[in-house]
Amino acid sequence: MVFKKLLGAIGVGGPSVDTVLSNPSTYPGAPLTGQVNLVGGTQDADIEYITLALVTRMEVEGGGGDYSATGDFYRITVSGPMRLHAGQQMQIPFRIEMPWETPITTAYGQPLRGMVMGVRTEVSIARALDKGDLDPVYVHPLPIQQKILDAFNQLGFRFKSADLEHGQIYGVHQTLPFYQEIEYWPAAQYAHSVNEVELTFVTSPHSVEVVLEFDKRGGMFHSGQDTYGRYTVSHADAETTDWRSVVDGWVRQAVDHHKSRPGYGAPGHGAYGAPGYPPPGYGHGAPAYGHGGHGGGYGHHGHYRGGGHGHGSGMGGAVLGAVGGLAAGYLVGEAIEEVFEDFGDD
């Protein structure tokens, strides 16, 4: 869409910029293509650079509590220094390789409640940066992700919401400074023992780490706890596996393991990873990692809350580290309503 205001560095008669996506729908690991259309104003303009950024919103845990932050997690430069002459028209094609860990924003043809993402065009003229409007991007599940989502649906789990949490999952290699949580209300057969299930995908070119957090129900004689499981699945198995049975097995294993632990029914026992409760193995021979609750410096799933831990691997410098991006504070001050005003986000 065309910038709503002319570039401030030029003022009246300045150039206009319009970024057009070939198709706003994409997948993790797939390309997002389009072109940036430039139209010169009434005078020549020296453009220093044009950058495209993938922008999203996430929850950050800080000293004063949780807050929402909006910012970019991937950026590419589509043009370096150049002169745009008065009235000149120019088209700059681009190709964004979506990171494999890009969160899902759309499922079953509908936006996932709580998720928003877009491409923002930034133009620098005369050392003044002008951030344009956001063009919405819709990230659909990969086949293996879709099969697992289908299995939860078939088992009777009901989608609640989704969001992004700033942090790192303990024991899981990540290239982005956040992870997605897809939250479900429990299926009827598990409602007596599970309050909520949180599903996280950490995707790579060959496999997906599936991390599940089960919020356990408490009772009169025992407290509720969180139970965690980690499973490694291959993209190649998407069409050859009975995923309903596999996912049902994951849930049953978590519930049964919780009930069979020594001391079940007594208050105060931790989740997997506590002394005396080694986690079982899952998936294709890969070990599962049961992480401690929310103590010891970890957050959900036992995640690190520090910034910059393991960011940017394999991405050249296109992926922003947490410290250089969100945690630095310059993005937090942007009004979320303004940044995503064109999305109609509810």
Image (cartoon, rainbow, N blue to C red):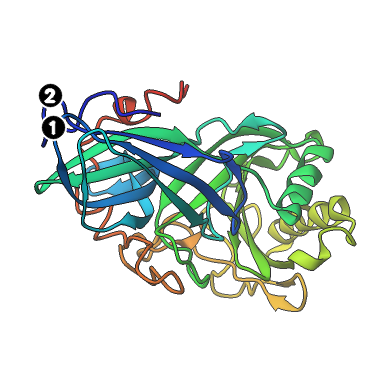
What residue did someone put label 1 on? 8
Q: Is residue 320 left or right of residue 237?
A: left
Q: Quadrant of the N terminus?
A: top left
Mark 1 residue type: Gly
Q: Which mark is residue 256?
A: none
Q: Position of residue 250 (x, y in %)?
A: 76, 57
341 or 278, nearer to the observer: 341
Question: Residue tagged by mark 2?
Answer: 12
> What is the spatial separation of the Cα atoms under label 1 and label 2, in whole angstroms?
8 Å
The residue that appears at 59% across and 65% down in the rendered structure is: 272
* Number of numbered labels in the structure image: 2
> What secondary structure is found at the residue carrying circle 1?
loop
Left of 94 or right of it: where is 221?
A: right
Q: In x, y percent, where is residue 57? A: 39, 40
Q: Are marks 1 and 2 in contact (CB under 8 Å)?
A: no
Q: Quadrant of residue 295?
A: bottom left
Instruction: Tell me the mark number nearer the camera, choosing from 1 and 2.
Output: 2
Which quadrant of the structure image shows residue 263? bottom right
User: Against 250, is 333 above or below?
Assistant: above
Q: Quadrant of residue 339?
A: top left
Does residue 11 appear in the picture of this structure?
yes
Of 272 and 64, which appears nearest the observer?
Answer: 64
Residue at image position (43%, 62%) is 168
Q: Which amino acid, by three-letter code, is at mark 2?
A: Val
Mark 2 Cα-neighbour bin, 10 Å: few <14, some 14–19, many ≥20 = few
Q: Locate residue 158 relative to residue 55 in the image: left or right.
A: right
